[in-house]
Amino acid sequence: MGYPEEALAPEEQLVLHRHPHWKMLFWPAVTFILITALAGFGAGVASRNAEGTLRSSLLIAILVVWLAIVLWRSVTPLLRWKSTHFIITDRRVLIRQGVLTHTGIDIPMNRISNVQFRHRLFDRMLGTGTLIIGSASEDPLEYDDIPHVQQVHALLYHQVFDVVQNEQRGGGYHGSPPAYP
C-alpha cells in the first residue's frame, strides 16, 4: 500500500493524488546544470595549472563546494516537491508536506463552503495554478502550483456538491468517485 492509501480511512476512496507542478523544480534543475558546468570548468583549470597536493586539495574543495550547493539548491527542493501531496478522497481533502517535519491538514467535504482557482498567463501556459478552498469556519486556504487546476477545481466542486446532496437526503456519501484523467 502506497503513501496516500495508508492515510485513508476504511472504505474511503482515493479520487486524486498530485504533487505540486514540476515548475517548482525548474530553478533547482538550472542550478544543478550551472554548478556542474562551473565545477567541471574549475576542475579542468585546477588539473592543468596545479601539481601534486595542491591539485588534489583544489579538486577536493571543488567537489565539496559542488556537493554542498547541489544538496542545498537542487536535492532539497526535489525532496520537498516529492514529499508534498495534494489528495482528494470521496470524504475529504488532505494536504501533506515535509521531509523531516511533517505537516498536514484535512478538510472534510461537508466543511468546504467554496472552491476557487486562480492562474496567471504563465500558469495557464504551464497548466498550473492556485486552488483556493474556503471552509465554513476558517479563512480560505490557498495551494499554489496545483497541476491542471481547472480540472481539480471542477472535480473538487463536484465532490463537495455530491456530499452536500447526499447529506440533504439523509445519507452519507457512498457513491463512486468520478473519473479523472
Image (spheres, rainbow, N blue to C red):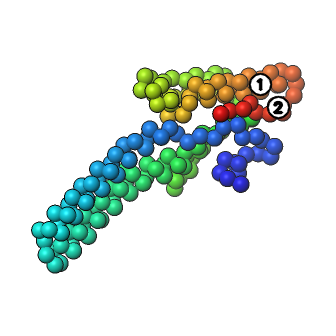
Residue 114, position as x, y percentages in the image:
64, 21
Q: Which of 179 and 82 is in front in this view?
A: 179
**Residue depicted at 71% across the width and 48% down the height:** 5
Q: Is residue 144 visible?
A: no
Q: Do the residues labelled 2 and 1 touch (CB within 8 Å)?
A: yes
Q: Is mark 1 on a helix, strand or loop?
A: helix
Residue 47 visible in the snapshot: yes
Q: Earlier in the sequence, mark 2 or mark 1?
A: 1
Q: Position of residue 61 (x, y in %)?
A: 24, 67
- Residue 162 has which mark? 1
Quarter of the image for residue 89 reads top right
Q: Which amino acid does label 1 sit on?
A: Asp
Identity of the residue drawn at 25% across and 64% down: 62
Q: Closer to the camera, 77 or 9?
A: 77
Q: Counting other residues with Cα less than 10 Å from the Cα at mark 1, is it few (<14), some (14-19), or many (20 or more)?
A: many
Horizontal and vertical percent for residue 141? 56, 30
SS at badge 2: loop
Q: Position of residue 140 (x, y in %)?
A: 57, 26
At x 24%, y 55%, the residue is 38
Mark 2 vs mark 1, CA separation in Å:
9 Å
Report the side of 163 relative to 77 (left or right).
Answer: right
Q: In which quarter of the image is the N terminus?
A: bottom right
Report the disc number at residue 175.
Answer: 2
Of the pair 145 and 108, the residue shown nearer to us? 145
Residue depicted at 55% across the width and 23% down the height = 117
Q: Locate the C terminus by quadrant.
A: top right
Asked if residue 73 lies left or right of residue 96, the reply is left
